[in-house]
């Protein structure tokens, strides 16, 4: 999903996570969610509403039977807001809501010291295929697959700011539905809203990579503060 769609600066909306869900008002957000993925780490990406292009990312650890925030940062979402992942269509500049695994990381720059995730270096021949007719649809391909048209693929190295560091989000990944969307990542901020990814400042992305432990099975939950896409549904 091409990052860095240019929009006028959007002021970050104030989030009041304490009023979400049916749990105790003071309980941490993950404790009020229906599903956190079963692991001991979680990243939540929360927007005020489906039309929002900004919000907050928080990363959490499960400790002594409770969820504890390890860090937080301002986040950016798709230029056309958020939509339920199962209803999303490719090319709509929307961020899919839902609960997703994080298969591996990649980056143009070296992995931050302490990164435990598999970290693929982006090279001149690294592409992400978005061609719905390709056998490599929604996959890293190096070099670009013969049946994946360059016009329907991201040449990863050309996004030096956004893909300095990134985590792959397994939206439409394991059993891809062609046309639902490809190339959804958690990555470094560009100049404005994204084309469907979630982005954070560079230092936050580096902190997340140093924190994330694949043995603790982290997931990314994307949602809004209320409504059909409320993050507490996941």
Image (spheres, rainbow, N blue to C red):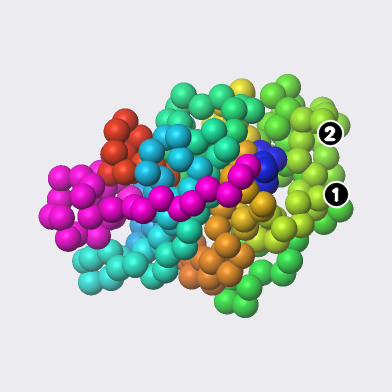
Query: Residue, x 58% and y 69% (percent of image)?
Result: 203
Q: Where, by quadrant of the figure, is residue 196 drawn?
A: top right
Q: Is residue 94 above or below residue 70?
A: above
The C terminus appears in which quarter of the rendering?
A: top left
Report which residue position mark 1 lands on: 125
Main SS type for the magenta part?
loop
Report which residue position mark 2 lands on: 150
Query: Residue, x 55% and y 39% (percent of image)?
Result: 78
**Which of the two marks, 2 or 1, is nearer to us in this view?**
2
Label 2 to label 1, Cα distance in Å?
Answer: 12 Å
In magenta, the rendered stretch is 7-36
The N terminus appears in which quarter of the rendering?
A: top right
Element type where label 1 sits in the image = loop
Circle number at residue 82: none
Q: Position of residue 124 (x, y in %)?
A: 86, 53
**Residue farthest to the left?**
24
């Amino acid at each position: 999903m091409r990052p860095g769609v240019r929009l006028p600066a959007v002021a970050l909306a104030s989030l009041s996570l304490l009023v979400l869900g049916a749990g105790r008002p003071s309980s941490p957000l993950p404790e009020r969610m229906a599903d956190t993925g079963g692991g001991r780490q979680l990243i939540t990406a929360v927007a005020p509403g489906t039309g929002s292009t900004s919000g907050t990312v928080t990363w959490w650890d499960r400790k002594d039977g409770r969820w504890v925030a390890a860090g937080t940062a301002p986040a950016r979402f798709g230029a056309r807001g958020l939509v339920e992942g199962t209803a999303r269509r490719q090319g709509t500049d929307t961020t899919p809501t839902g609960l997703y695994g994080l298969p591996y990381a990649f980056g143009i720059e070296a992995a931050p010291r302490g990164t435990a995730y598999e970290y693929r270096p982006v090279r001149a021949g690294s592409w992400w295929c978005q061609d719905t007719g390709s056998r490599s649809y929604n996959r890293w391909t190096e070099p670009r697959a013969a049946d994946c048209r360059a016009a329907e693929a991201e040449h990863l190295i050309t996004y030096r700011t956004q893909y300095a560091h990134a985590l792959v989000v397994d939206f439409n990944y394991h059993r891809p539905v062609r046309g639902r969307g490809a190339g959804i990542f958690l990555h470094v901020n560009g100049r404005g809203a994204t084309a469907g990814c979630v982005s954070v400042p560079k230092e936050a992305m580096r902190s997340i990579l140093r924190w994330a432990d694949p043995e603790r099975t982290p997931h990314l939950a994307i949602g809004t503060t209320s409504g059909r896409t409320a993050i507490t549904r996941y």
